[in-house]
Amino acid sequence: MLSSPRLRSRQLLYDELDEVNPRLREPRELFSILSTKRPLQAPRWPTECEVIKENIHHIEWAPPQPEYLYQPTGNEKVPEIVGEEKGTVVYQLDSVPTEGSYFTSSRVGGKRGIIKQLAVTLQGPEDNTLLFESRFESGNLQKAVRVDTYEYELTLRTDLYTNKHTQWFYFRVQNTRKDATYRFTIVNLLKPKSLYTVGMKPLLYSQFDANTRNIGWRREGNEIKYYKNNTDDRQQPFYCLTWTIQFPYDQDTCFFAHFYPYTYTDLQCYLLSVANNPIQSQFCKLRTLCRSLAGNTVYLLTITNPSQTPQEAAAKKAVVLSARVHPGESNGSWVMKGFLDFILSNSPDAQLLRDIFVFKVLPMLNPDGVIVGNYRCSLAGRDLNRHYKTILKESFPCIWYTRNMIKRLLEEREVLLYCDFHGHSRKNNIFLYGCNNNNHKYWLHERVFPLMLSKNAPDKFSFHSCNFKVQKCKEGTGRVVMWRMGILNSYTMESTFGGSTVGSKKGTHFTIEDLKSLGYHVCDTLLDLCDPDQTKFTQCLAELKELLRQKIHKKFNELGRDKDLEGSWSDISLSDIESSTSGSDSSLSDGLPVHLANIADEINFNRRDKDTPLDPSMTTLILPKNKEKMQNKKPGFTVSCSPKRTINCSQEPALGVKPNWPRSRYPATKRGCVAMAAYPSLHIHTYP
């Protein structure tokens, strides 16, 4: 009876094996919209995690002066690692789950019972021992060892249920002394290369400054050194980061962080303000995409202006943006916040974008990892950005439902652009990773958007750092999977943890405002990409062809071969002349944990018995309907205006120079410098 077609309903869910164990689908509308009538959904933690009851909140602040990169002197001290044998442990978490264990349950507030006092007990007002704490949202500190009066060795906690991925740090210190020079040394970092070797500084936040002077996070630190830890004989060596600092006040509460934190609670507060805004809530609909492993909500925003007719609604193309699949890359959240600030504003440009696009926005894909302070993984103990092909819906729900949502979206409309916001720990500037297009009809088209973005943000974005080679180890990433599903403009946006080496911001750290401005520039570049006048698009293609011609010429010279580049050379494989992406050190997937591999084997075995494909996403990721649509239509990018200069094939295009592209292609009420006055918060100037 249960297998009867009459009982088949979209409200019933069946398990992976399609067994007769149906359960009701979670009702969408009952929890999709945030409300001021009830408190925010408290974060759910693994039951192994202790969580303090204090609410940690930081103010946003833009430093009035540029924060310059640290200039190494070559005389920085390299402290000898002493360890707890010769030092005193002043803070240490209880045993946390690592490799070999796996997530089982969660609850609001984490571990049951009384919260232990982990910091040392001060012996009196003269005791100058620092008091450490990290058991709060996004916090990460495993242990602190006092090795001298003002010197501490710090050990970071690995990502939960793994034994690696130490990079992100965020912790609190109390009982500071103003006139002392402190030294902190993190002793268990895993990456051999780091931006700390080229001038990046840690971030400091003074609670006293925030309360009395409205000053927030700022770059601080001297004698910064990143070096190999030679005291450990491990097969995979550790690396150390050391720095000195003077706290601004006595008895202050301060925080250190690898980058500007942006927590799950920060996101919920932001979405709450949108949901309760009577204007923004008309064109921004909040839904729940799914629940994470721990039961935290993964939010999906649909942003578009109401259409006048069904035909107008159906004609709109879609744009998909996501962030924080890697929880320690908070850069992505600040770029996303800048995008949302602009697209939800009353700017004529924002209104125009909402008129012509449907935006699907996933602001935090990995809320569990963000909450517990992971750098790279979810509570499955794996990098979600290597598992977009997964068949394990229950183990990787955030990724499975994202891919499924985009598949459905492709069936109903063209997706012009997909972009996943990330952070980069080894390269400065902001840049994109894309996918080389093998269709000669759209040859080099995937590079137009990054080139335009480099012209719109010449002091932050580096086109020369972009890469479009698709490596085998990246086949499970969001950008490659979406590209194979038929999205030509499929990108990973990498924002540095450091700063800029180009344009007017060269030699300075990026601030929160710099990253938020990138969100605006994404919007601005989208309008350039879809300009009905194709002059600008044609100009960019010409620049790209010239750049490629020069790169091919250089490659053949290196090989000692001659090549006639005056004839037809567009048949040369772009992958052959492009180097691999210098992305993360975690490019290779670890595969599935044993307990998940067994489940996957069982699912595949049962599907083989039913003569069904092992994984529909692996057999074909390109939807036939969408593929046909893309082949029969022009890509819809149109761009133009008077170019600043004509293309001269004898010269390399000046990629860092922003062309003089006037804004006459849309009605004056929609585009123009004057329109930006209605949106002053980003302090961005449009083209002259």
Image (tube, rainbow, N blue to C red):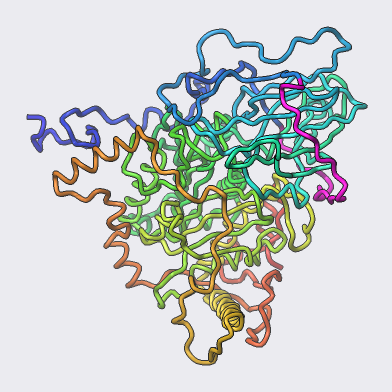
Residue 160 percent coordinates (x, y): 51, 30
User: In the shown orientation, is residue 548 left or right of residue 594?
Assistant: right
Q: Residue at x 61, y 17 (%)?
A: 52
Q: Nearer the viewer, residue 538 or 435?
A: 435
Instruction: Name the spot of residue 212 as percent of width and height, x first.
Output: 83, 26
Relative depth, front residue between 231 and 156: 231
Q: Hey, which residue is sitting farthest front in the picture? A: 233
- Residue 255: x and y, percent? 73, 29
Residue drawn at the location 15% of the way across and 36% of the way down: 8
**Which residue occupies the extreme right position in the image?**
179
x and y, in percent, of residue 204 in the image: 77, 34
Q: On the image, which quarter does residue 507 sit in?
A: bottom right
Magenta-drawn stretch, dominant element (helix, strand or loop): loop
Q: Is residue 374 left or right of residue 487?
A: right
Comparing 482 with 284, the one in front is 482
Quadrant assignment for the C terminus = bottom right
- Whether residue 168 appears in this view of the structure is yes
State whether residue 349 appears in this view.
Answer: no
Residue plotted at (27% across, 62% down):
625
The residue stretch that appears in magenta: 59-87
- Res 114 quadrant in image: top right
Which quadrant would the N terminus be assigned to in this image? top left
205 is higher (above) or lower (below) than 524: above
Q: Is residue 20 left or right of residue 660?
A: left
In which quadrant of the rendered view does residue 506 lie? bottom right
Depicted 172 relative to depicted 446: above or below: above
In the picture, measured across the screen, residue 116 lies left or right of residue 202, that is left
